[in-house]
């Protein structure tokens, strides 16, 4: 009888978590019609030029080849044809939102595979959608959400493939890895490689799995793909630009600037995960007598996730030029660790975290419906009005600028 009652309560909890997860994802729709933010115009312009010129493999930016592969554009263009090209920004944001939703699903799949707990699975997904992803990074029309989905999917498939010795999952890991390159950069291979090294170390009894023929073939295809792509499609343009981007991040500025950046980076990450990050610290401090962190790190899955995070964050933490959004492929793993940690801290911690998430979602709707539009209108100006003024002044003639930036 007690087992039946507990099962019923768990199912009810799953339904509540699932509904709030959907409600959080739907909040993205409130910001679909906002004006361009940051560099959102990059992929809308390249998509426009690709469609206009019928150039489907090399994105064009003001008539010249853009230095990023076209997977993000490939998703944007059909949606733009469907919605109308005047809504290309909406199409771009819809792709980013869909990628964020899919990342949540992959995270849920990984957590369920590891812990066999549906409530915890949904709880980790809620945490993933509680901070930076919910208010900014999950819906902006940058390549980061799609890139994160591809990289994390590859890592998750590799992890489960090793855990369950299912070689067929390596096929999906290969697709994710190749897709990450086609979305943005070669750094997806670095995330994957460091994660694979940690999994190789942690799963010492299953290391042979990575040397089976299917694994070697899959990873060989993934490694060869960027070389084949650059040799046959872009004639080296994407490869050289990507390598240049990575090397540019290694140029040291002034020593004091570098030290300041190193000291502030962990704080920046912590802020991106508010309010869950501060709740985790509070409840850990509250339970310090129980040595909760020691108990948490005894779990093989949580410990593996922590080490994967450490190995992957360190290069970005220590790099002279970096940004927190560059570690977005690690966001699901951060949610994995935070979710499991808070889950082990007891019912009070779980309940408080969930209620805080509910408040965050409600604030997201307020921000999307009123806050963001008010800020854009009163502090950033009306871009559409400026564009119409330019068209009126130039009377439809081309407008040129000498400043290439």
Image (cartoon, rainbow, N blue to C red):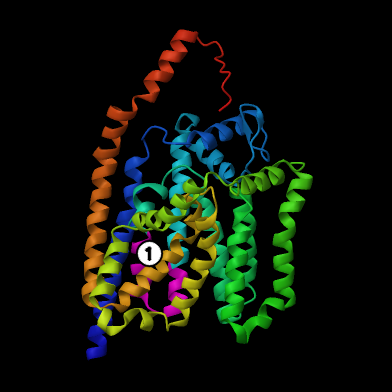
Q: Position of residue 27 (x, y in %)?
A: 31, 49
Is residue 122 within the magenta segment?
Answer: yes
Q: Position of residue 70 (x, y in %)?
A: 62, 43
Which of the image's four quarters has the N terminus? Answer: bottom left
Is residue 4 within the magenta segment?
Answer: no
Compared with residue 125, is residue 147 higher up or lower down, i.e. above or below?
above
137 or 179, which lies in front? Answer: 137
Q: In the image, 281: left or right of 176?
A: left
Residue 402 in sight from this viewpoint: yes
The residue at 65%/67% (across/down) is 171
- The residue tagged 1 is 125
The magenta segment is 108-128
* Label 1, residues with CA under 10 Å away: few <14, some 14-19, many ≥20: many
Compared with residue 391, is residue 176 higher up or lower down, i.e. above or below?
below
Q: Main secondary structure of the magenta part?
A: helix
> In what element is the residue under mark 1?
helix
Which of the image's four quarters has the C terminus? Answer: top right
Q: Quadrant of residue 208?
A: bottom right
85 or 109, which lies in front? Answer: 109
The residue at 29%/66% (across/down) is 17
């Amino acid at each position: 009888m007690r087992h039946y009652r507990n099962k019923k309560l768990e199912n009810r909890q799953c339904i509540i978590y699932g509904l709030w997860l959907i409600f959080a994802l739907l909040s993205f729709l409130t910001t679909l019609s906002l004006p361009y933010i940051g560099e959102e115009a990059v992929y809308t312009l390249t998509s426009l030029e690709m469609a206009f010129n019928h150039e489907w493999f090399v994105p064009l930016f003001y008539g010249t080849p853009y230095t990023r592969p076209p997977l993000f554009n490939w998703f944007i263009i059909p949606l733009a044809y469907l919605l109308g090209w005047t809504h290309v920004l909406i199409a771009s944001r819809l792709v980013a939102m869909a990628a964020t939703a899919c990342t949540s699903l992959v995270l849920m799949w990984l957590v369920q595979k590891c812990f066999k707990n549906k409530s915890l699975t949904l709880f980790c997904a809620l945490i993933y959608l509680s901070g930076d992803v919910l208010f900014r990074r999950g819906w902006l029309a940058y390549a980061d959400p799609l890139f994160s989905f591809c990289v994390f999917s590859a890592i998750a498939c590799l992890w489960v493939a090793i855990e369950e010795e299912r070689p067929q999952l390596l096929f999906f890991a290969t697709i994710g890895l190749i897709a990450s390159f086609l979305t943005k950069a070669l750094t997806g291979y670095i995330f994957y490689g460091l994660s694979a090294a940690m999994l190789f170390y942690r799963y010492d009894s299953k290391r042979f799995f990575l040397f089976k023929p299917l694994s070697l073939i899959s990873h060989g295809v993934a490694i060869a793909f960027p070389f084949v792509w650059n040799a046959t499609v872009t004639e080296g343009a994407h490869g050289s630009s990507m390598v240049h981007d990575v090397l540019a991040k290694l140029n040291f500025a002034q020593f004091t600037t570098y030290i300041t950046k190193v000291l502030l980076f962990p704080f920046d990450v912590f802020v991106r995960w508010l309010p869950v990050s501060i709740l985790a610290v509070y409840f850990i401090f509250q339970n310090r007598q129980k040595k909760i962190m020691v108990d948490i790190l005894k779990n093989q899955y949580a410990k593996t996730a922590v080490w994967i995070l450490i190995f992957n964050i360190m290069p970005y933490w220590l790099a002279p030029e970096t940004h927190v959004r560059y570690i977005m492929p690690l966001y699901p793993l951060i949610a994995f660790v935070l979710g499991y940690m808070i889950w082990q801290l007891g019912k009070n911690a779980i309940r408080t975290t969930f209620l805080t998430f509910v408040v965050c979602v409600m604030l997201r709707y307020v921000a999307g419906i009123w806050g963001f539009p008010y800020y854009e209108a009163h502090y950033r100006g009306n871009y559409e009005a400026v564009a119409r003024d330019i068209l009126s002044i130039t009377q439809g003639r081309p407008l040129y600028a000498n400043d290439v930036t």
